Every structure is written in structure tokens, then in C-alpha cells.
Amino acid sequence: MTIMTKQHVVTFVAKQGILIAFVLFMVGFAIANQRFIAMDNILGVVRSSAIIGVMALGVTFVVIGGNLDLSVGSMMSFSTIVVLDLHDKVGPAMAIPIMFALTLLLGAFIGFLVGYLKLNSLIVTLGMLSAIHGLTLTWSGGQNMDIADKSGTWFSFFGQDRLLGIPVPILVFGLLAVVLSLLLSKTAFGRQVYAVGGNGQAATFSGIPRARIVFLTYLVSSFCVATAGLLQASRSLGSQNTVGQGLELTVLAAVILGGASLLGGSGTVFKTVIGVLILGFIQNGLLLVGLDFYVQYMVTWAIIILAVWLDVAAKRGRLWSPIA
Amino acid sequence: MKMTMTAALACTTAMFGAAAAAQTTTIGITQNNVGVDSYQTTYERAFIAAAEANPDVDVIVLDAGGDVARQLAQMEDLIQQEVDVIIIWPTNGEAVIPAVRRAHNAGIPVVVTNSNIAEPGFDFIRSFSGPDNVTQGSRSAEIMCERFTELGIENEARVVQISGQPGYTTAIERQQGFDERLPEVCPNVTLVETQPGDWNRERSQQVMEAFLIKYDDIDGVYSGDDNMGIGALNAARAAGREGIVFVGATNFAVGYDAMAEGDYWGSIYQSPVDDAEAALQTAIDILNGEDVPFLNYFDTPKITQENMDEFTKPVF
Amino acid sequence: MTSQNRRDLIKQSGIWVFIVVELAFFSIVGNYLSVSDQAFMDFDNMLLLLKQSAPIGIIALGMTIIMINGNIDLSVGATFALAAIVLLDSMTWPFMQNLGNWAIPLAWGFALMTGVVLGAINGLIVWKTGVDAFIVTLGSMLGFRGLVFMYNGEQPTSHLNWTLVDFAEAQFLGLHTATWFLLGTALVLWLVTTRTNHGRNAYAVGNNRDAAVNAGIRVGPHIMWNFMLIGFLAALSAVVFYSESGSVNPNDGMLYELWAITAVVLGGTKLAGGYGSIIGTLGGVIAIQLLRKGLGHIGADTQTVNLVIGLILIAVLVMDRQLNRQGKEELKI
């Protein structure tokens, strides 16, 4: 009987673990520093997490589909540089759709390689990480890209303005989260993504077009990357070629923290949002209590492993791994 | 690439006419991290252009991509290829010393460009060609102090500093110059905190956001270059904090523009074109057996909103 | 069975064919484009190639066994940096300075121990929690990097010891110190994978973990030994490289994990586990370094280097896929 209860507790903690951890963090930091829960601080954290967050939404689709995307950081640099460059050449109204089209093209290329050619996603996106960086440098000639007339363009709207008192990046992040959450949980496409990631073989036999679904997850991912690039470009109105460098792993950490299994087939958009916010608030909270940034690395290490451990423990019904 | 190619083709052609070949000298350069910011890209272009203009010189242009291991490998390659002079833009002022010694032992003179190597390596180089970064740091401190005095806050102002990449000699020297000079000219100004921004605009923006969360009262920001300074300015703008005096170094085009708009106060004018040409000239002078000063600085004057008309807008 | 063997042979020789193509290409193109009078295929240049392959190479060799196991290690870059810091910093400790040159082997020992301990931490977590190695090491990639920054903030750790540099720069029988370490590691690991029980178990675990458990292999400790091995090798790589350079930045070693994995995959090892060879990885490492060196030799610029390396990686994957598919299943689009 006691074992059963213990198991129930383990299962409950494991299933809701990430939410519990989130609440504990918030309460802890709020006690340590009042300023942490001030409205402007909270808005500030969410706003600066929005760019990572938007990318994480797309990567969630890829990961649920059973693949990885390590190229998002590099691709985000590309989107940012391209839209900034085109802004002064063809105007913002044209620059944005062209940038989206080009980024989606990159996503389609990756989707083709991973989906239709069935190549390993880790290596394909690793190769693309390097190749897209080369592409970005070729586009810009290695120069920083800056909008000439910074005060006179409406392009700054996405990254800097507020609507109804809320910063636009937060609205974009929230809106995209809702739309993609519906897409994943309420549509046939969403169910197919889970099916392909959960068991690719079975999915093929049950007539789900595996290749096309994987292809589409990469399109969703690149669309999100393009949106992130837009926010980034609009926020700073100028950029280096390396602006997204290294973000791929932060994004992946947020997605994993949200409970998406790297084996595919599980995860939700909502939990990814929680994962993103946890990373953002940890960074901010540790800073407010005066700890160095590297403490954040170690805290992230600990909670990633704890979160995933609890998740797999709940699935197998016991805490420790059965391998001898 | 195209330019190198033309230069190389010219060289191959020249080799058929044997007489000309004997005259040409080969200079190899290993750069720090081209493409990471405009300064380094502009430097590379200017270097290739300058070498092209000189028919007696061929250049091998390599880029270490910021990786020490790759730079050491490139040094070995240049030594193996028996170039006449090696120019190095160090990725890490200390880690490259053994590689520099190897070139020295192989009888190849080494010129360090832009950012010096650490002192234990001085025996193995012929010359350092670049800006005097300690002086740049002190000049930035003076610019900031003068501005505080104009504003009448020289007795209470609080300053934060965003430094360049740790371990990079330019970053260390600029910080040193600033840290030493500020208390001399403005003894009552407090330097609250220094954090590295890694020469990166995004990183610097994040560092500044953190400063703004931690400190309610910031009157001045000194950044190790304008690229980082603009990142800090963006953070202050987004947080709606006004009246902060921004002073940088290595005036970038964005910094120049922000100065013209009145958002950014001052900087140090330093041209990558001068930098590249000086390095190449130093190398050529060494080959011609001329006397070259060990520390071969080119001048980098102060630039502020008040005197910026005297300078043309930087191209990078 | 014979056709299987033949296919294996083709796959394993693939990387060496690729290397020969690279050599031919850069030699011929180099004649037209290179400024240097030296031929690309110069003997000394080829010796340098081996030496320059060592930092990534030693790590990649260890990564091969991890990947044959069906695992992966993303934390090797951070382990590399931390071991380097321990190496250089330990020589400045007061009691070490009293030891004179005896401090050097001791410092090597400390650094290698650091690597083993970090590897053991990864291995233990993978074993006991059953969390996928990718996630465990993604976490420790951050965590170990945090330790690196904790040690000395964002400042570099430096200690220049000329005795150490002279040792690292020495050549024995024409080969550089680093080359000896690279080849020595390759030889030992080749013997381990092909001649020992541990090696056979590595393939068995990677092929089918459950079957391996049923066959009585103690999978947990086996995996942990391999993580300790790669920790050791990441540290060995740091020891060999930083003996010659004397200063480590806290960001050093970043992306090394990705280059090491790339080399292993180029060498024919399967990410899913159960298949792979040390000799293939050695080829993969040399192929990448040759590509870098060659592109530099013909004067390619930064963006071309990035573009070409990324696309070649994908191209090799496509070709490999085609070889694997022969006779089984036609490519369907």
C-alpha cells in the first residue's frame, strides 16, 4: 500500500514536476527579492525571453516529430541580417515577406533532407549550422547590418513598441504560442506529428505520410525562426552576423525542460512556454539576488536532468534505471 | 576571395617571367575572427587592397575564426610555407606566444597587429603595429569626466563599464587605461561594476539590461568599443532610461550616427584601414631592412558630439 | 555475408577515397591559386596535418566508442577547457612550484583526473537515472562550462612553462609529440574495439541494449567506463594542446563536441549505435583538417570555408545513405 502511494506521488510529481518547480522558483526568488515580482520586472523577463521562446515553439514541433534542429541559431542570424539589409533596399513592407520566404526555403531544404531523404537530423542541421553561417557572411560581406534611418521607420514596431500596454514581442510570442498550440492539439496535422514521432514505423503502416509531416515540422520551425529574426532585427535595428550563435542549445534546453522527449512523440507547446519562462526567470532571479551568471549554467544543468529524470521515472514507474 | 585570386594569378604569371619572381616577397597574415564584426571585415578588405596595390608583395590571408587551436595551426602552415614575414592578430595574447617563438626560431620576423601579445613574447616579435589601447582607455575616461563636469555631476556620478573579451590584450589595456585615468581626473566618480561584453552587441545589450535591473542610478557607461556601446544604448532606450552619458572606443558608423542624433556622447576614432595599412607597411619596412619602432602606434584621437564634424563617418 | 563484407569494405574505404580526392584537388588547384611556392603534398606539410588533427582527433576517437554504444557526449568541449585550466593553474600552486620540473607530470595527472571525474559524473547519471545520454551531456555541457567560469571568472588562466612547451614541440622519429599521442590513442582504442571483450560488448550494447542485458553484460558499468574513457581523452587532448600554448580562455573548446561528432560520422560510425570503427574516425578527423588546410592553401575566405564544410558534411551523409540502400530499397521522394 505504501509503495502504491509512493508511486502515486512520484507519478504526480513527475507529471506536473515542471510546473511545481516553476512555482517553487517564483516563490523562492520573490521572498529573496521583492523586486522580482514587480510587474515591470516580470514583463522585462518575458520580453527578453520572447526571441528564444518563439524559436522554441517551432523546435517543439520538430522534437515531437522525433528529430532535432541545431540550425535555428544560425538561421536566426540569417533572417536578421537579410531583413535588415533589405529594409533599406526595398523597404520594410517588402523586406519582411522576402525574408520569410528565404528562411522558409532553408527550412524546406532541411525538411527535404530529413523528411524525404531520411537523413539523420542531428548531422544535417549541424551541417546547416555551418553552411547557413557561411551564407549569412556571403550575404552581408561580413559587415554589420544597420538600418540607416533608425528613428523614422515603423519597422521598430515589432521589437520596441507596446500595444495595450504590453510589449509587442510578448504579444507575438503569446499569439504564436496559442495558434501553434491549437495546431498541435486540435488538428489532424498535430495528431500526425505525435504519431510520426511516437512510432515512425507504425505511422507509416497506418498510412500517415511520414516524410511530408517531418518536412512540415521543419517549415513550422523555420517560420518561427523567421519571426524571431524579425523581432531581433526590430529590437536592435542593426546586427552582427553572429547574433544567433549558440542559441540552438538554449532553445533545445528550454524544449527539453518543457518535457518534450528527444525520442519524439511527447511534449506540448504550453510546457515549452513554461520551459522558456523558467530559463528566463532563473537568469533574472539569480541576477537579482546577486549571483554570477555561471551559477545559472549549473542550476540549469541540475533542473534539466531532474526534470527529465522525473519524467522517465514516471513512465517506467520506478525512480532508478533498471540497467545493471 | 576574388582579390586574393587575382593577386595569386598575377603571381603565377609573374613566375613565368623569372626576373620578376625573385623580387616578390610573400607576407602571411593570420587574423582573429573575420566576420564577427565590421571592423575585422573592413580590416581584411583594406589589407588585401593595400597588398594588391603593391606589385612586389603577395599575401596569404588566413582567418582563425576566434579559435586558438586553429590559429596555432595556421602559424605552423605559414612557417612551413616559408613566407617572408608573418603578421598575426592574436586570438589570445598569451596562448600564441609559443607559436610566435617557433616562427622567430625559423628566422621569420613576426609583426603583431591590432592587439598586442603578452610581455613574455616580446623577445620573439619585431614590432607591434596598432593603436595604443592604454591611451585610448585614458582618453575615454577624460571624455567622460569632461562631460560630467559640463553637466555638473562630477562629484556624484556613477559609471558602469562594459569591457571587451576577457583575455584579449586590447580589452585588458583599454580597461586598464580607463580604470587608472578616471580617478585621476574625476576622483569622486564611482565605477560601480565592470562586466565583459565580448565585443558583441547582443551580449552587451544583455549585460546592460542586467545593470539597469540592478542599479537605479547610472550616469555613465564606458564600453570597450562602439559596437558594444550601441548595444548598451539600445538596452537603456528599451528600458526608458534617459540622460546616461555613453562613451566608447573604436568609433563605428552606428556610434557616429548615434552621436549625430545626440544619444551617444563620445568615442575614440580608429580606422581599420589605417590599422591594416600600418601593419602591411611595418612588414614591408622590416623586409627592406629599415628601422622599425618596437611599438608602432598610429594615432587615435578623441571624437565627441562637439568635434565630430572634423571626422568623416566610419565606413564600418 | 560476403556481399555484406564487401559493402562494409566500400563504406570503410569511402573516407580514404575522399581524402585522396581532397589531396588531388588541393594539389592541382593549389598550383594555380596558391601564393606559396611549396607544394601542398609536401611531406612536412602532411606531418603537420597529423599534428593539427590531434586536438579534435583524440576526442573524436573516444567519441567513437561512445557512439558505438548508441550514446553521445556533448560535454567534451567543456571537459577539455576545465582540464586545461587545471593543468595550467596547478603548476602555479605553491607546493607544485617547489617541485621544479616534477610539477609537470603531476599537473598532467591532475588534469587527466579531472577529465575522468567529469566523465564518471556523466556516466553515473546515465547509468542510474536512465536519462538519455544526449540530455545528460547537454546539461553537463552547460554545467561543466559553469565550473570553468567559476574557476577564474571570465579571465583566461595562463601559465607559460618553456620546458613544457619544448616537450610539446619536440619531434621524435620525425613525428611531433601531439602526433604520437593521436596515433597512440588510435592504436590503443583500435585494439580495445577489435580485440577485447569490452570492445565486443560495446557493439552488443549499441546493437540492442535489452539483448545485451539478457546476455549478461553489465550495461550500466560498461557505459560508465566509456564515459570515463572519453573524459580522460578530452583531458588528454587538452593536456597535449595546452602544453604547447600556455593560456586557456574560458570559452575554449566550444563547438569541439560538434566537430568531434562530425568526424566520427564522416568515418562511418552510425549514430544509432552498434556500428563503427576507430580507423574510420581517424580518416574522418584527417579529412576535416585536410579540408580546412586545403581551403586555406587555395585562399578561400571565411564564408566559403563555412559553406563548403557544412555542405560536404551533408553530401557525405547522402552518399552514405545511398551505399546503405543499395539493393534494399530505392530512394523514394
Image: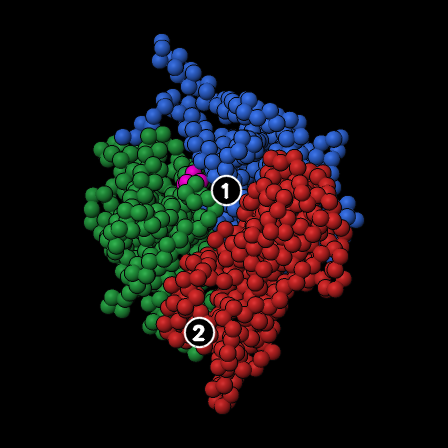
Q: Is residue B276 left or right of residue C68?
A: right
Q: Residue at x 66, y 27 (%)?
A: A39
Residue under pointer 1: A249
Q: From what the image shows, is residue A42 above or below residue C145?
A: above
Name the quadrant containing residue C204.
Answer: top left
Residue C31: x percent and y percent? 45, 77
The amino acid pointed to by label 2 is Pro
Parent chain of label 1: A
In front here: A115 or B106? B106
Q: Residue furthest left?
A: C196
Q: Main secondary structure of the magenta part?
A: helix
The amino acid pointed to by label 1 is Leu
Q: Residue at x 77, y 48 (%)?
A: A151
Q: Is residue C199 left or right of residue A161?
A: left
Mark 2 packing: few (<14 Cα in 10 Å), some, or many (20+)?
many
For discs 2 and 1, the disc positioned in front in the rendered view: 2
Residue under pointer 2: B109
Q: Colour of chain B?
A: red
In front here: C238 or A8? C238
Q: Which residues are magenta?
A: C143-147
In front here: C280 or A157? A157
Q: Colour of chain A?
A: blue
Q: Secondary structure at mark 1?
A: helix
Q: From what the image shows, is residue A282 above or below residue A94?
A: above
The answer to if A235 sits in the magenta stretch is no
Q: Is residue A217 left or right of residue A9?
A: right
> Which chain shows up in green?
C
Residue C192: x percent and y percent? 23, 49
Name the quadrant containing residue B207.
Answer: top right
Parent chain of label 2: B
